[in-house]
Amino acid sequence: MIAIENLRPGDWVIGHDGQPHQIIRTIAKPYRGTMIGIRHRHSDAWLWVTAEHRILCQRRNLDYGGNNTWKHIPQHHFDRARTLRKNKPLPSKNSGKPYDANNWA
């Protein structure tokens, strides 16, 4: 793997179509704004991108045999929801208090 800032015209990369493409030109410009960090759970490396950067991803195709229950979800995945319900109930639409998505912990 090569850091994107080290890529130069003439280098080869794999495109969104899975095919190799030769870099024709690069663009570098200063950026001031929000950066988003993305990390896979099996890696210690972070990918930092601007908030407007598009990320190509592929969804996992999960099939649970047509069983539309929650039984296939591990129980510990519900821990966060349980904590929220016990410790800090979300305001209702009629409470008049705006919900702050950044302060829900």
Image (tube, rainbow, N blue to C red):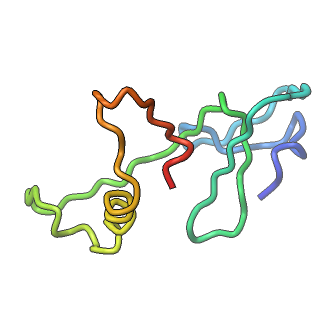
Give the side of residue 96 with respect to residue 47, left or right.
left
Quarter assignment of residue 4:
top right
Which quadrant would the N terminus be assigned to in this image?
Answer: bottom right
Residue depicted at 63% across the width and 58% down the height:
39
Image location of residue 58, percent across then percent down: 44, 47
Nearest the viewer among 61 and 11 is 61
Quarter assignment of residue 28:
top right
Image location of residue 70, percent across then percent down: 17, 62
Image location of residue 79, percent across then percent down: 35, 69
Give the side of residue 41 with respect to residue 64, left or right.
right
Quarter assignment of residue 53:
top right
Give above or below for 17 relative to 52.
below
Give above or below for 33 relative to 88.
above
Nearest the viewer among 24 and 64 is 64
Nearest the viewer among 69 and 15 is 69
Residue depicted at 71% across the width and 57% down the height:
46
Give the side of residue 103 with respect to residue 85, left or right.
right
Number of numbered tags placed on the structure image: 0
Residue depicted at 25% across the width and 67% down the height:
73
Residue depicted at 77% across the width and 43% down the height:
12
